[in-house]
């Protein structure tokens, strides 16, 4: 059986529900240097497929304004999914919720209602990559491909090179009732899988032109593309002990570019502040759900959390001000004087955020309102480790621990993939 895996909508478990609204402010920061990326757009190959599909459907007489356009896009996306699943068990193939298809699948079989592949058409490559294609300058706002989008579509269609069928020919067979796995070998699957390491020479050249054009249109971001962060810098993100040095390295590396350096300073402060607040929220959620008399007050840790949160709020507020941004949560938490007032302010913020979304609060001043929203055992272990750091006199150790536990996505790995395709990184 072929198993179609769902998109991983957020990068880490702690981000999945965003009970404190941090994703909005993280996006405001990333938009200053990588606005064309989201947590769902990590594959250059998927963007190449997107451009090809828009061009292909246009040739078949389907326009973006037509009511069945998303369904027809899904027709060819399932073809890509079949090939990606055969090429790699780990491939993300853009279909929702573990739909199963037999090994020899045709489009007619895929369209059966029981397979549930057409019920959430906003997910997948069309939903996730359309706005990204506009930001890259590949797609016009009316849904038609721009010149470079056409170039990328043609290059992706022929990425297999001599001896490998074009994706257009494979797609036409699929739409006419052929099974995509028939008469194709592993080379074809490997070439067209979105996560493939294979890139055609034409495709590389087109991406280099796209990145050059993007840099000309966005001079503030150009240094990141002309001289991308090297691999050794990116590796700092991968370890609890080195992660705090990542943004410090970027501040030095791009110090001559004041807007970039200021943005990276704000990102570093954002990670520290939000990690503290997220932990306070989850710790209070877990404690509120414990039986009376079991709760651990941990007074030394509580005092340290209050002091470090006030400090982190002040640093972040200053760094946001340097890039002409503000965040009311920083202002409110800069004013707290005790852990109890910190706890009350965090719970109040959560309640207001959930009300703004039209969603029920997980936690109110009266206790837990929705159960099962936090992994209690993980939070308890995190509290024990943070408490040990404070007992050892290491507030910085506690901060490193919390930042690592609640780390988020800044898209440097995604940008590295694009730079590598264009030959800007080895």
Image (cartoon, helix red, strand yellow):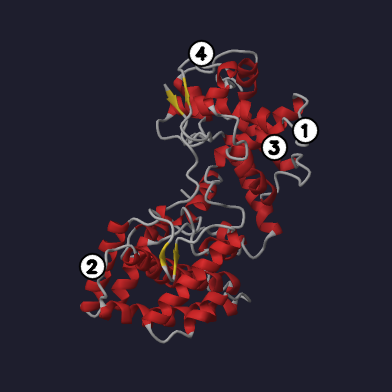
Q: CA distance from mark 2 to mark 4?
A: 62 Å
Q: Is residue 122 left or right of residue 420?
A: right
Q: CA distance from mark 3 to mark 1?
A: 24 Å
Residue under circle 2?
A: 294
Mark 3 or mark 2: whose residue is earlier in sequence = 3
Q: Are marks 3 and 2 in contact (CB under 8 Å)?
A: no
Residue under circle 4?
A: 182
Mark 3 or mark 1: whose residue is earlier in sequence = 1
Residue at image x 48%, y 14%? Answer: 104
Name the mark nearer the viewer: 3 or 1: 1
Residue at image x 61%, y 17%? Answer: 174
Q: Are marks 4 and 1 in contact (CB under 8 Å)?
A: no
Name the mark nearer the viewer: 3 or 2: 2
Residue under circle 3?
A: 151
Name the mark nearer the viewer: 2 or 4: 2
Q: CA distance from mark 3 to mark 2?
A: 64 Å
Q: Quadrant of residue 233?
A: bottom left
How busy is the neighbourhood of tag 4: few (under 14 within 10 Å), some, or many (20 plus)? few
| Residue 379 x, y percent position in the rendering | 31, 62
How busy is the neighbourhood of tag 2: few (under 14 within 10 Å), some, or many (20 plus)? few
The foreground one among 56 and 317 is: 317
Q: As displayed, is residue 116 above or below residue 414?
A: above
Q: Is residue 393 left or right of residue 264?
A: left
């Amino acid at each position: 059986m072929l198993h179609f895996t769902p998109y991983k909508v957020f990068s880490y478990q702690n981000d999945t529900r965003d009970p404190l609204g941090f994703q909005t402010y993280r996006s405001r920061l990333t938009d200053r240097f990588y606005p064309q990326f989201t947590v769902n757009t990590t594959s250059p190959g998927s963007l190449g497929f997107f451009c090809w599909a828009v061009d292909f459907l246009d040739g078949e007489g389907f326009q973006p304004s037509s009511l069945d356009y998303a369904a027809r896009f899904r027709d060819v996306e399932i073809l890509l999914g079949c090939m990606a699943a055969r090429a790699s068990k780990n491939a993300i193939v853009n279909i929702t919720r573990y739909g199963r298809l037999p090994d020899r699948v045709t489009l007619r079989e895929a369209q059966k209602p029981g397979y549930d592949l057409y019920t959430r058409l906003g997910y997948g490559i069309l939903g996730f990559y359309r706005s990204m294609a506009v930001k890259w300058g590949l797609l016009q706002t009316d849904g038609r491909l721009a010149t470079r989008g056409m170039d990328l579509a043609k290059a992706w269609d022929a990425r297999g090179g001599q001896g490998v069928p074009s994706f257009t020919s494979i797609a036409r067979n699929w739409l006419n009732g052929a099974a995509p796995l028939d008469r194709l070998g592993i080379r074809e699957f490997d070439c067209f899988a979105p996560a493939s390491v294979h890139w055609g020479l034409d495709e590389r050249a087109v991406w280099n032109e796209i990145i050059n054009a993007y840099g000309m249109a966005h001079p503030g971001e150009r240094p990141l593309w002309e001289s991308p962060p090297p691999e050794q810098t990116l590796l700092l993100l991968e370890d609890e002990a080195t992660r705090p040095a990542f943004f410090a390295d970027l501040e030095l590396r791009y110090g001559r570019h004041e807007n970039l350096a200021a943005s990276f300073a704000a990102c570093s402060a954002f990670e520290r502040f939000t990690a503290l607040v997220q932990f306070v929220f989850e710790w209070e959620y877990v404690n509120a759900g414990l039986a009376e008399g079991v709760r651990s007050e941990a007074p030394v840790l509580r005092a340290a959390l209050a002091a470090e949160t006030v400090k982190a709020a002040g640093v972040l507020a200053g760094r946001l001000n340097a890039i002409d941004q503000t965040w009311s949560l920083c202002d409110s938490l800069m004013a707290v004087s005790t852990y109890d007032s910190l706890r009350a302010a965090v719970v109040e913020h959560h309640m207001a955020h959930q009300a703004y979304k039209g969603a029920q609060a997980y936690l109110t001043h009266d206790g837990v309102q929705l159960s099962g929203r936090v992994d209690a055992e993980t939070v308890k272990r995190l509290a024990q480790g943070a408490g040990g750091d404070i007992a050892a006199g290491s507030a910085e150790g506690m901060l490193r621990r919390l930042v690592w536990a609640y780390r988020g996505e800044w898209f440097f790995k995604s940008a590295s993939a694009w730079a590598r395709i264009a030959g800007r990184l080895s």
